[in-house]
Amino acid sequence: MLVTRPSFRGVGLFATANFRSLSTVPASILDVFKYPPPLSSRLSVRGWVTAVRAQKKIAFVQLTDGTTSQTLQCILDPSLVKGLKTGVSVELEGSWSESKGNGAYELKVGPEDTVKILGDISETYPLQKKFHSSQFLRTIPEFRYKTNTLGALMRLRSNVDFSLNQFFNTSGFYKTNPPLVTSSDCEGAGELFTIESNSRQKGDTAFFGKKAYLTVSTQLHLEVLCMALSKVWTLSPCFRAEESDTNRHLSEFWMMEVEIAFVEDVHQLTKFTEEMIKATVRPLLEDHNGIGTDIKDSKRDPEVAKEMELRWKQLLAKEDWDCITYTKAIEILAGAQRDGTVKFEYEPVWGDSLQSEHEKWLAKEYFKGPVFVTDYPKEQKPFYMLLNSDNKTVACYDLLVPEIGELVGGSLREHDLKKLQNEIERRGMNAEEIEWYVKLRESGSVPHGGFGMGFERLLCYLGNVDNIRDAIPFPRAVDSCVC
Amino acid sequence: MLVTRPSFRGVGLFATANFRSLSTVPASILDVFKYPPPLSSRLSVRGWVTAVRAQKKIAFVQLTDGTTSQTLQCILDPSLVKGLKTGVSVELEGSWSESKGNGAYELKVGPEDTVKILGDISETYPLQKKFHSSQFLRTIPEFRYKTNTLGALMRLRSNVDFSLNQFFNTSGFYKTNPPLVTSSDCEGAGELFTIESNSRQKGDTAFFGKKAYLTVSTQLHLEVLCMALSKVWTLSPCFRAEESDTNRHLSEFWMMEVEIAFVEDVHQLTKFTEEMIKATVRPLLEDHNGIGTDIKDSKRDPEVAKEMELRWKQLLAKEDWDCITYTKAIEILAGAQRDGTVKFEYEPVWGDSLQSEHEKWLAKEYFKGPVFVTDYPKEQKPFYMLLNSDNKTVACYDLLVPEIGELVGGSLREHDLKKLQNEIERRGMNAEEIEWYVKLRESGSVPHGGFGMGFERLLCYLGNVDNIRDAIPFPRAVDSCVC
């Protein structure tokens, strides 16, 4: 698209370059790297200074605008360097040149050119050119994303989000948005947030006419949409009032959930889950649009970058991921405990929950990669899961990955009205609250199933991030809502 | 992709067809239409019966699975039709044949074939083959999406969502997720929802350590991310505790918001807004993947479908949409009132808000299409907008479209620390609450701007829908939270 409004500063300079960005929005540093203008072109760039090194005859300025972890090297006449320091925002105009240094290109800004400072920094500017801990950075939410590591994580988040959108779109799924405000507690876990209008006085009628909560999972509503559209998915905020202050929990997180009609075997779901996750990994490993390089370059430690790439390779290594039953998992765990291969804190016993240590050992040490565990005992799982013919286990699965443990959980759903009602009664649940859900089984019910995946957990795994609070902008947890 | 698990019923039958859907998930009726298997293939399909017509020697069954508004015609031997009625879910196996009727293909199910009823309907099943009002359908949230009209709207929603994702991805934007739980009131409008943990007792410390609200707009947090990544967008739930029970308001809705660094002219934003909306319309008008036909076919009244298509054409008709200042808008409105062209209830006076009647008249009658109105009086607008040199107006805009009125609102943001602080003080706002936001202007501040668009409003306009409660699954409003 050619430039139609040459009065916009900077934009007109790109008129001859093959920019895919819209002419009305300034080109970014990523654009300049991806679609370099002809050599010797006059070019105007904007961004934040990450480093300045001034010598007698020449000054080097590294510039970023957060669109890539690669900085643009600018060679300035030393007379122009006044006021430039880490954090300052500038507009630089110069000529586009081949680089004599590491990068392929650089911007030469000569004595006749101008450097315009757009925004200076205060004396208390907290981001200096040194290492800052994640914990410290979380205390300055207004500045933390300016760091290369967190910036790259946000770009990773965006790219994985887009990969998921593409995957589901080409797979014939419809994206939908179940409600966040709900009057039912999907999992019965009880760790709910209540919601009320600010202006309603206590004693007034409730705003929604009844008690209202923030959703802990969109599944029940998603099943309604599945019974109408067959293949649906969502990527949606969910909320859990967990008091635990760990590096694996958030009070507000994004969950990807999927429901598929007419599936009758839990292995249809595991295989689909596998395809979905592989679809988010391939663009990273194949470095589509440089997104793999971007996140690797953002790691200070090359070992960390290498380990991250190993994770990607591990996810794509096998054509079919390993898959065992819960019963088999217990056998393996108990066997390893018995023969002294490993020493677990919790004894693996059929009927008990798999502990995090069990999950991680199975994935990391035993299978050395992702593994599906299916058919858990029914007492461990929610009311809506399809009972197996053994009457003891349900047609469900968890996906375990090294370091993280559970990444995905899914199941076939009980689609028989009577059986679902019996299970609700047996558990002493409030049937009235979910009458609308149960009714789904009354008219044109079909076999179906689905799964949920914590989006931030996936990002932690793909991005080799230790603390889940770095995988989401402005993390929320108990006692933590900085702004 | 070839079938690897032929034991999954139905799937093996498609082995020779060019299906893009994954082999592990059953093919949908849309798949069958898009990638028809060779004639005479054995085929198994699943779905819900929408109509049955049994004659002596032949029976016609229309089948849907909600993936397209087009039903699959099945020709059954009359001996097989027992138990089939509207709403029942079935699995039909037969041979794929050329149609003698309207459709290109049909499924022939002969006396030797089997029809399997997956789920019967109850006697009280509310969806019969007749017209149901939107209002009635909202009382049966568990069934309403099975209707053709609402199903097609949900598919439109998904398709427009995907168009937006593609547009921003190719435009170099990063998608991000600002928090929904916040401790600041972005617009100062006061119609907030408060949020608290279910298990915390009154008098206990607040769960988040302070008062927490659901966000009314993600803008302030999005600006933080913009100052780090340059070009960011989100499609996110927002919440407003509005007491008004109208066909234009929701308490929970999805808002698309955008922030762009280094823009300095409000017309860069209007042009970008225009490109974005056009990117959602083109696939509909050009009928990519049949999505235009799908939503048109779902309308009972061909006039409604025609009017919808006219809207799409109107949005693409002009290379540059009209754009006037607020001052000019008042002149046009007052002139039309004066010379008797139109009789407004509210007198158009400089300084007063544009009323909905003004907005709709400007777009529908005067410009006969979308129109941007820029530079409103500062007293009408929030504190963060960039003041123009006239000291009276701000660098902002609204996009007005026929029938709907305001669809988008945006502005340049005040990026000067002192000016922003002065405005906050002048308005008597609580500066402490948004100190983190103001601090952005302290270190490396740059000119920037952005806009917000109610996602459901766009869907109402593109889908020719009167009531916004039909554009979102499970609408929430005052006294309305059905399940």
Image (cartoon, coloured by chain):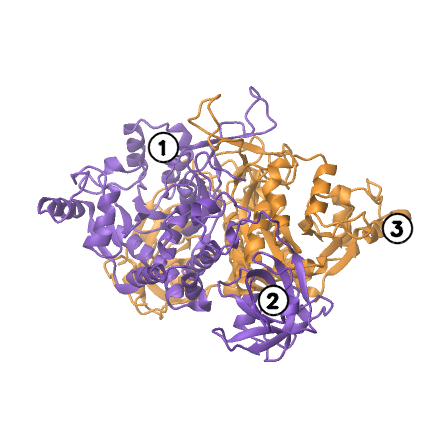
Chain colours: A purple, B orange
Residue A424 in the image: state x and y as whole percent.
Answer: 31, 31
* Residue at horizontal 41 percent and vertical 38 percent from the top: A216
Asked if marks 2 and 1 fall on the same chain, the answer is yes
**Mark 1 is on which residue type?**
Gly
A302 displayed left or right of A1: left
Residue B335 has which mark? 3
Residue A188 has which mark? 1
Quarter occupied by the N terminus of chain A: bottom right
**Mark 3 is on which residue type?**
Gly
* Residue farthest to the bottom, as pictured: A39
B82 displayed left or right of A84: left
Asked if marks 3 and 1 fall on the same chain, the answer is no
Name the chain under label 1.
Answer: A
Q: Disc 2 marks which residue?
A: A27
Residue A351 in the image: state x and y as whole percent.
Answer: 19, 37
- Near-viewer residue (B111 or B415): B415
Quarter where residue A303 is shown = bottom left
- What element does badge 3 sit on? helix
Label 3 – label 1 distance at C-alpha: 62 Å
Residue B296 visible to the viewer:
no
Residue B463 in the image: state x and y as whole percent.
Answer: 59, 53
